Image (cartoon, rainbow, N blue to C red):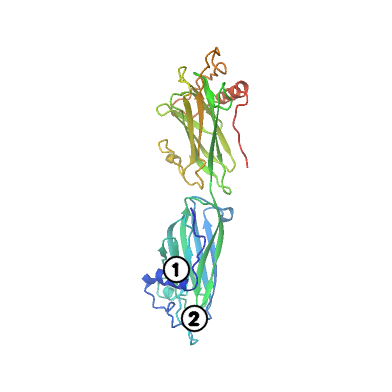
Amino acid sequence: MSFLSKWTLGGALAIAALVAVFSAFGSTASAGDDDVGFDGGNIDCFKSAFGFDDPDAGFELGEEVRFEVTCVVVDLGTDVTGGFVDDNLTIIDVLPGNFQIEDAFCLTTGTIEALSGVPNFSAAISGQTVACQATPFFLGSTVTLVVIGNWWTGPCGDIKNVATAEYGGDEETPAEFIFVECADISVTKTASTVTDSTGATVAQGGTIIYVVTVCNEPDGFGEAQFVFVFDQLPLGAEFQSAASAEFALTFDGTSSQILGTTDSLQPGECGTIFITVDTADDAPCGTPFTNLAVGGHSVLASDITGSNFVGGLEGNDDNNRATVTTTVACPTPGDGGTPGGPSVGTGNSGLLDNDTSVAGWQLALLSLLIIGSLSGAYVGYRRVR
């Protein structure tokens, strides 16, 4: 999603935008009057970002962020006659398109509004544009624009946000540089059989061993919490076992679906699941067994459901799915047997519906089968960045 990184209006367009944004204010100040010019005004402005954690370490998707733009009057503005005129101090900030604005308000000191008993009031909001306007009365008067919200989607990485402030002929552009961290779950899958170590073919009644690898490859150092992966077994395949050192596993026999969950994956960390299925002895020649794996992570563990494969809080979801297809290969007439020899059987792991424990011996046995019985089989990896 493209988004505006700074306020780009200037000159007459900027004045027109200010008049439009603040038409509802009903101000009697003459900031937009062509017959009155202001000069000599001077403001110092700065912008800051605050988060739940250390902002210097970056912000994670879903984390609440508070932007503040504060301007201090250094010199009061004068009109063309040299007399003081109540010119408005205006601050405008355009937030990125993927920033969800939750609240915005204005804080003032030493302004006509503050002296009138209204030092705090709501900011004007139009789409992603947020603005404050108040009239300074003393040197040292301040106006602060506060915007509270969060990022729920990417793009992520370095973001420069620039605000624009104007008073008495002086214009300032305070900026803040932040880094938005996004966890990025990637899913890869391989298959191995006795017939073909690449998993492209399987004999009738043969065994397929799937290896599903789930990694967190973030922008920055975004931790992925409540990570899940659903594996949809092919129609006609009979589940035998599943094992993982990193994921807790459950098997739903009704939907032929395996769910793996873990509390978190650190940046660069991976987890691997080994799944063994058998094909039917009378599986038709050329039958494709296509296995789908979908991964992601969620705000809450309770949000993980198997019906929709829905994840969230991720900058890139293009790499969250992986499939692999294994085709039944039958003997060529006259060969005298099943190609590739007998199929490998691992037995039943004892993984029951809603059973989230996987015994260590299962993983060890499955690893031995893969290494000892399948030449060139892919065992899985852990990638550490």
Percent from the top left, x then y, of residue 305?
Answer: 42, 37
The image shows residue 143 at horizontal and vertical percentages of 48, 70
Q: In the image, is residue 127 above or below residue 351?
A: below
Q: Amino acid at mark 2?
A: Phe
Tally of numbered discs: 2
Query: Which amino acid is tagged 1?
Result: Cys
Foreground label between 1 and 2: 2
Q: Which residue is mark 2?
A: 38
Most extreme residue toward the front, as rendered? 334
Query: For the C terminus, which image quadrant?
Result: top right
- Furthest-bottom residue in view? 81
Seen in the picture, residue 375 relative to 97 is either above or below; the reply is: above
Provide residue 190's location: percent of width, then percent of height: 55, 31
**Residue 114 versus residue 45: which sits nearer the camera?**
45
Q: Could you tell which of marks 1 and 2 lies nearer the N-terminus?
A: 2
Residue at image x 52%, y 81%? 39
Would you call the spot at circle 2 few (<14 residues within 10 Å), some (14-19), or many (20 or more)?
many
**What kind of element bears circle 2?**
loop
Image: 7 above or below 187: below
Q: Residue 197's quadrant in the figure?
A: top right
Secondary structure beneath dot 1 equals strand
Location of residue 285 with respect to 18 vertically, above or below: above
- Between the C-alphas of marks 1 and 2, the distance is 19 Å
Q: Are marks 1 and 2 in contact (CB under 8 Å)?
A: no
What residue did someone put label 1 on?
132
